[in-house]
Amino acid sequence: MKSRAAIWIPMAVLLLAACRTVPTTKEDALRLLIADIAAGRVEADPHKAVTPTDPVQSELFLYVEEWLNVNAEALTHVSPALSPEGPFTFTRSANGRITYLISDGWPGKQVRTKALRPVPGTRITMLGWPDPLPWEQLGAVCVIETPREMADEENHPCTQAFVFRFEAPAR
């Protein structure tokens, strides 16, 4: 049986190759990938920019692959959802029931966004964390409580960018 890493490395290669510019650092690689997918900028033929034997590209791909092991659903089979808001970018699932908020950096004790107004019954989770997160709508601001255990960076499920999944109730 293939390991998760063996499955996601080809995806990391394909997704990184789809970026509109060539990243120079692993952090930029992930940031550009998220921005390009959230904006709907994906090359028709992502294979054309791949050089798998290039050691610099390999390092970038492995970094992105590690992040994708936790967060791939926020970037695969999605479409642009909303304009970016500060450190947040957004994607939406193909069926439209799930919106992903991708935070560039750890948001702290709370995620606060004016871009999303979840309907009552929406289930909000953080990818890599098993439990639903408490949230409330305070006027124009949606406030999500992050897990207390995540205050310690060692407990983060991934690095650099964190994904919050908003799943609307079935109709």
Image: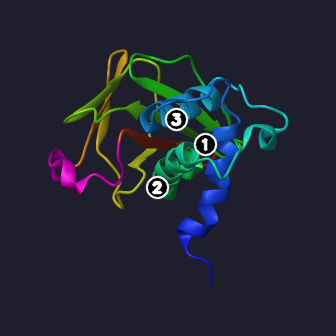
Q: Secondary structure at mark 3?
A: helix
The amino acid type found where label 3 is placed reads Ala
Find the magenta span and give its range.
Answer: 148-159
Residue on which disc 2 sits: 66
Neighbours of disc 3 within 10 Å: few (<14), some (14-19), many (20+): many
- Is residue 157 placed above or below 23 in the rendered structure? below
- Is residue 45 placed above or below 158 in the rendered structure? above
Residue on which disc 3 sits: 29
**Image location of residue 59, percent across then percent down:** 49, 49
Q: Separation of disc 1 and disc 2 at Cα?
A: 14 Å
Q: Earlier in the sequence, mark 2 or mark 3?
A: 3
Q: Secondary structure at mark 2?
A: helix
Q: Separation of disc 3 and disc 1 at Cα?
A: 14 Å
Q: Earlier in the sequence, mark 1 or mark 2?
A: 2
Farthest residue, direction front: 54
150 relative to 50 in the view: left or right: left
Q: Which residue is found at the position 36% from the left and 61% from the top? A: 130
The amino acid type found where label 2 is placed reads Glu
Q: Which residue is found at the position 45% from the left and 33% from the top? A: 25
Q: Nearer the viewer, mark 3 or mark 1?
A: 3
Q: Which residue is found at the position 53% from the left and 43% from the top? A: 56
Asked if one can make out residue 122 in the rendered structure from this viewpoint, the answer is no
Residue on which disc 1 sits: 75
Q: Observer-nearest residue: 140 or 130?
A: 130
Q: Observer-nearest residue: 2 or 22?
A: 22
- Identify the colour scheme used: rainbow
Q: Is residue 67 magenta?
A: no
Quadrant in which the N terminus is drawn: bottom right
Neighbours of disc 2 within 10 Å: few (<14), some (14-19), many (20+): some
The amino acid type found where label 1 is placed reads Leu
